[in-house]
Image (cartoon, rainbow, N blue to C red):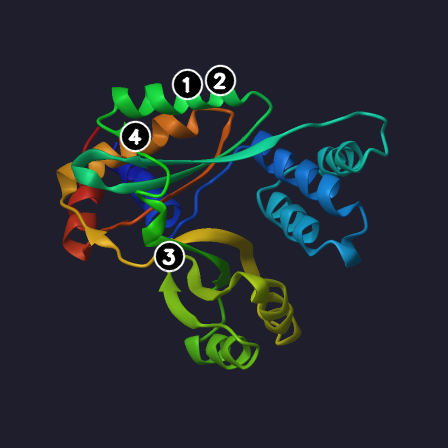
Amino acid sequence: MSGHSKWATTKHKKAVIDGRRAKSFAKLIKNIEVAAKLGGADLTGNPTLYDAIQKAKKTSVPNDNIDRAVKRGAGISGESIEYLTIIYEGYGPNGVALMIECLTDNKNRAAAEVRTTLSRNGGTLADPGSVAYNFARKGVIVVSGEGTTEDDVMLAALEAGAEEVEPHAQGFEVITDASDLVSVRAALQAAGLDYESADVEFVPSLKVEVDADTARKVFRLIDALEDSDDVQNIFSNFDLTPEVQAELENDEE
């Protein structure tokens, strides 16, 4: 159905081009567990946990699930969690660059799944460093566009040290140095601006425009990678022109 194609295209525009994707409850819960393990259960002293919980709530994860995840991660419930963060670099169709972030309790399984998924969908696993040079760790805050102007966002964000403000499918995207993410997010909140998410992500220094056929292949690869429970985030350097996006939105299934 064309409606579904439009939803999928919009989803991927946010998820891949803007470095953002919809996560399952399980992956959101895993983020909370790791944040609580690293920084404790106190939200006032653990901004990473605060943002992980906010993202889960905005995705309608039940409060009981969130509370249990915090207790598991912080060791309050007596349970123990052990996850490794592993970054795989790869190339998708037509050389599109990919940074694949895994959060796993089994390194061998994660590596095998990523390698197999890439090879089955027109991609390849890359040597460490061959893709990462084109990406930098940045704070990325998505601000809701409802009732908000770009001037409002720029005034609050830039005064707090943000690097730039760009249009985004959900409103506006604020880019910061990774170390300034919390202070800029707090400044936006103080200005009464609602934010959809606040994360440290891999942001490409150079984006590459692709045609509709390449985009379809990359979307299929991203979907396949997201099927893995070990894959937490995927970042890419490809971009779509308005014409290509319009073509994709008209696809019939």
The answer to whether 194 is drawn above or below residue 131 in the figure is below
Q: Which residue is under mark 4?
A: 221
Would you say the residues marked 1 and 4 are in contact, meaning their CB atoms lie under 8 Å apart? Answer: no
The answer to whether 177 is drawn above or below residue 10 in the figure is below
| Mark 4 neighbour density, 10 Å: few (under 14) some (14–19) many (20 or more) | many
What is the CA distance from the residue labelled 3 to the residue labelled 4?
22 Å
What is the CA distance from the residue labelled 4 to the residue labelled 2?
18 Å
Return the disc, 3 or 2, that comes first in the chain's sequence.
2
What is the CA distance from the residue labelled 1 to the residue labelled 3?
34 Å
Q: Which residue is under mark 1?
A: 112
On residue 109, the disc is 2
Which residue type does callout 1 highlight? Ala
Q: What quarter of the picture does the C terminus occupy?
A: top left
Return the disc, 1 or 3, that comes first in the chain's sequence.
1
Which residue type does callout 3 highlight? Ala
Which residue type does callout 2 highlight? Arg
Taking depth in this image into account, of 89 and 21 the one nearest to the observer is 89
